[in-house]
Image: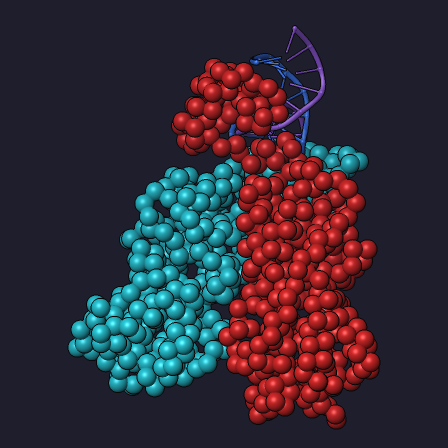
Chain colours: A red, B cyan, C blue, D purple
Amino acid sequence: MRHNGRATIVDVATTAGVSVTTVSHVLSGRRPVSAATRARVEEVVRRLGYQADPSARGLRTQRTRLLGLVVPDITNPFNAELAAGLQEAALAEDYLTVVCETPKEPSRVRAVMRQLTARRIDGLVLGRYPTDEGVLDALLATGAPVVRLGGRLDAGPGDVVHAAETEGMRDLVRHLVRDRDYRRIGFIGGAPGAEPGGDRHRGYREALTEAGLAVPEDLVVWTDFTREGGRAGAARLLAAAEPPDAIVCANDLIAIGALDTARTSRLPVPGRVAITGYDDIEAAALVSPALTTVLNPAREIGRSAARVLTDRLDGREDGPAREVLLAHRLVRRESA
Amino acid sequence: MRHNGRATIVDVATTAGVSVTTVSHVLSGRRPVSAATRARVEEVVRRLGYQADPSARGLRTQRTRLLGLVVPDITNPFNAELAAGLQEAALAEDYLTVVCETPKEPSRVRAVMRQLTARRIDGLVLGRYPTDEGVLDALLATGAPVVRLGGRLDAGPGDVVHAAETEGMRDLVRHLVRDRDYRRIGFIGGAPGAEPGGDRHRGYREALTEAGLAVPEDLVVWTDFTREGGRAGAARLLAAAEPPDAIVCANDLIAIGALDTARTSRLPVPGRVAITGYDDIEAAALVSPALTTVLNPAREIGRSAARVLTDRLDGREDGPAREVLLAHRLVRRESA
DNA sequence: CTGAAAGCGCTTACAG
DNA sequence: CTGAAAGCGCTTACAG
């Protein structure tokens, strides 16, 4: 027994009077061990508080039991919930999750990706990410399974887990057109080259088309998925020659920024202009007027992504790429 | 050169025509290497995209370059900001951060702590944590350095990084008493046995005493650091025989919950009862009326904690425990 | 049902 | 300025 630190598998084997092979098999269950031997080993493990060294195990198995989550902004409550759900479900399968924010500066994005490959993470969950070619290549080249949280199954690598966002946005815009009679409906998107904003944009266009309305291209603007982005985007829309009577925002933060601009401009919401969000983060119900939005089940998406990834990593699933679709729900409040 | 995956240090050594010893020293800089050799090795490293295997390195050095952050609730924007700042500064020193939520059920707290010790994290940042004896023992026994984000330096292990919360709360309560003339000031705390709520509670008491006001013990209640907790706590205070004219909350989420209760009870804020928060999370400015609160620099606290920890881990600091104090600031808005 | 031994990929005393 | 070799703590083919 070493005196300086924690017990090793050799300590356990010596104390229990068996080989390290047997200790290893008791712990992994990968080979039958007699009941008596098993009981003795388990008792020693407990007594010494033995926990296998993850570095030693990792070196041998070439697995780190580390999962990566890449999101642009952990401060966005949607992403925080997502991370919590992922961590929770991953922990249950004995995986640890590392959350990486995509830096604002493109030069640093590559550096963060390098850190993840250097760390040999076993699997990766991509939240909103730059579709920019090349950034992910090194990571994908390692063969680590990937889960994307948006976009079409055939538009990229790996499995996809998400709520039906095209449908969610379609429900929302239908509500604006049918129940509220808005006609000139603008759109503020996040980054145009980023998923999953694309699905939401698609739903917006489809619902308008389906209602026989032309998409007002002069009222479609792109900023980023922040409150600040929403302020700027709304300012541009409201300054249009023929301003919108409703503004559909690609997420709640953008919508909260749009509310700021409406307030500053003294335009009543929804009297003069309706504003809608997406995600239903907690703040959506706190602002005034409370946001009409679509519930996006962040925590459940995180849990589900963890399961998809660990199913592949632990060999419970080896089929072709799958898409997991979670339910959305229109949340009608005061802003539209 | 192996064909199946990434280059190893042997690949680099063979290709460059030197020993692995030399490659290792070029990479670590821990021993002089001739300029010519160094250049050749570096070129090969670049060409093969060599990155040292963290498991192999970890097994040899007995370090994982993994930091842990324990917080009760990553959904609290204060904690999300904190995590982002910690991750950012840790990454710069080549450490990865793992965020663990303390589960609600006490039985699961120990399980999560076990996961962290099993993972051999190098250092630990404790956000709000159960002072409950024993939970941290296994972690501390490993000798990993710890940073606490609250409490007195001598009240626990490790270094402390925080804003001056006692002072922050004192400033806030002084403002209520001197500038606003409130006299009957209640307090809603988070868990009484949890740091850093204790500092805030202390500031509240000190400011009252200093102003010659008795602490109204019937108006001091404890719930937890959530909106739901704030609703319940405020309901109890407002039902008191002699209700408060101002309610000081231990964080913004509690205050937002208290606003809910005031609204439900049709009590104007601050006309009938003033309500204050702490932290200045984004939502504090979004609610109506906007919260008077104290700015707690979450991201900076995270960054600072990372530096304190990595300074110890990488041997740049080996003195006795230190306390790092960051500036707070009173934010006056509408609610008090 | 059990064990001896190889080997994963590094870092670092030891030696020259 | 450089290299040969030990050893960190596991898992798993191989053998009985």
**Image: B277 above or below B68:** below
Q: Residue at x 72, y 76 (%)?
A: A174
Q: Is residue B263 visible?
A: yes
**Where in the figure is residue B205, as x and y percent of width and height?**
24, 69
Decide which of B317, A129 is in the foreground and name it: A129
Decide which of B27, B145 is in the foreground and name it: B145
**Image: B143 above or below A232:** above
Count of residue discs: 0
Q: Residue at x 56, y 68 (%)?
A: A281
Whether residue A190 sits left or right of residue A280 in the image: it is right
Decide which of A90, B9 is in the foreground and name it: A90
Q: Quadrant of the C terminus of chain A?
A: bottom right
**Where in the figure is residue B313, as x and y percent of width and height?**
47, 47
Q: Residue at x 46, y 47 (%)?
A: B123
Whether residue A261 sits left or right of residue A242 in the image: it is left
- Quadrant of the rendered structure where residue B173 is? bottom left
**Where in the figure is residue B159, as x and y percent of width and height?**
37, 54
Q: Residue at x 41, y 44 (%)?
A: B107
- Quadrant of the rendered structure where residue A234 is? bottom right
**Image: B306 above or below A196:** above
Q: Is residue B57 visible?
A: no
Q: Quadrant of the N terminus of chain A?
A: top left
**Image: A20 above or below B136:** above
**Where in the figure is residue B79, as x and y percent of width and height?**
48, 61
- Quadrant of the rendered structure where residue A190 is? bottom right
Whether residue B108 sits left or right of residue B91 in the image: it is left
